[in-house]
Image (cartoon, rainbow, N blue to C red):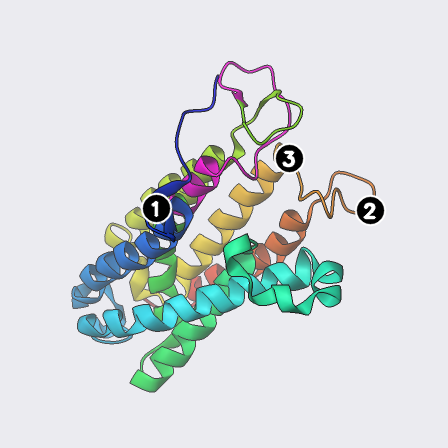
């Protein structure tokens, strides 16, 4: 399949350029906060009828979220994906416009921001992490679509009929659109599963359960797609085999997710 003719630049006003990738981050925060507000406003969903903080405060947290995502995502990329380069060129660490964000680092930054914000409100931190698990799939979905528009993070060559020839591929081979696989698994499918957990299975009444299911769902989806997604060129496959950095960083999330599910399951609803 030919790559769709989509300009990575959404619009430009003189020298001011706005890319779809930046809008995906912004849209993920805004739409996630809007959906989070609807969850926080439904007291019956939460343990003892107490959400981690009042619904209106989600817009205050949105500012904290942006800082946590940007700082965590950039720091994660620098440390785990290209440390030798940035150690030799420390001035480029702040050059966010050149790209280079790690989702795992952004997740840690977002969780840290949520824990600090919830603590300042006197709320239940596990319930706050459940809230993140319920809304984070929105940002994941939009972010992976933006990766596709940027023609980056594509997969290995394939003979399947939906293989895409990316304009940034020097070999110009049909490849797995791994960005769309991740958007479907980490974003759409995981959102549906967690929506069932929160609204049908009353999972938010067991603090930690929704966050744990999100961790398991994300890690399994990411590891599965990594088998057909090309690793970052500066890293390649680790230890000369099939293992990638994405798999390695997803394993602690998987373990933490399983631990949270067991912890929440042992507590009375």
The residue where tag 1 is placed is 191
Magenta-colored segment: predominant secondary structure: loop
The Cα atoms of the two marked residues, 3 and 2, are separated by 15 Å
Can you tell which of label 1 and label 2 is closer to the viewer? 2
Mark 2 Cα-neighbour bin, 10 Å: few <14, some 14–19, many ≥20: few
CA neighbours of label 1 inside 10 A, class few (<14), some (14 to 19), many (20+):
many
Helix, strand or loop status at disc 3: loop
Q: Position of residue 101 (x, y in %)?
A: 54, 56
Q: Nearer the viewer, residue 147 or 186?
A: 147
Q: Is 125 located above or below residue 159 in the figure? A: below
In the image, what residue occupies the spot 39% across and 66% down? 66
Q: Position of residue 167 (x, y in %)?
A: 54, 27
Asked whether disc 3 touches disc 2, contact meaning CB atoms under 8 Å apart, the reply is no
Comes first in the chain, label 1 or label 2 = 1
- Provide the secondary structure element on which disc 2 rests: loop
The quarter holding residue 267 reads: bottom left
Question: Percent position (x, y) of residue 203?
Answer: 32, 58
Name the quadrant of the C terminus. bottom left
What residue is at 25 percent from the left and 67 percent from the top? 46
Q: Which residues are magenta?
A: 142-164
Pointer 3 or 2: first along the chain: 3
Label 2 belongs to which residue?
A: 239
Report which quarter residue 214 is drawn in: bottom left
């Amino acid at each position: 399949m030919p790559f769709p003719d989509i300009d990575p630049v959404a619009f430009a006003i003189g020298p001011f350029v706005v890319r779809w990738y930046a809008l995906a981050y912004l849209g993920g925060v805004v739409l996630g906060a809007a959906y989070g507000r609807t969850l926080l406003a439904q007291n019956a969903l939460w343990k003892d009828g107490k959400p981690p903080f009042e619904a209106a405060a989600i817009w205050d947290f949105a500012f904290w979220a942006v800082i946590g995502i940007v700082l965590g995502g950039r720091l994660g990329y620098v440390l785990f994906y290209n440390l030798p380069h940035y150690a030799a060129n420390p001035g480029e660490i702040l050059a966010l416009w050149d790209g280079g964000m790690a989702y795992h680092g952004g997740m840690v930054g977002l969780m840290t921001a949520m824990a600090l914000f919830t603590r300042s409100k006197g709320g239940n931190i596990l319930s706050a992490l459940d809230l993140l698990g319920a809304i984070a799939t929105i940002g994941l979905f939009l972010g992976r679509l933006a990766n596709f528009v940027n023609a980056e993070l594509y997969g290995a060559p394939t003979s399947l009929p939906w293989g895409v020839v990316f304009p940034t591929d020097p070999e110009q081979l049909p490849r797995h659109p791994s960005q769309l696989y991740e958007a479907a698994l980490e974003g759409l499918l995981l959102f549906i599963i967690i929506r069932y957990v929160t609204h049908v299975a009353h999972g938010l009444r067991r603090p930690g359960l929704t966050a744990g299911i999100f961790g398991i769902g994300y890690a399994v989806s990411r590891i599965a797609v990594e088998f057909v997604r090309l690793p970052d060129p500066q890293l390649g496959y680790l230890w000369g085999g099939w293992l990638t950095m994405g798999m390695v960083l997803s394993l602690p999330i998987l373990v933490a997710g399983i631990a949270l599910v067991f912890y929440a399951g042992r507590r009375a609803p």
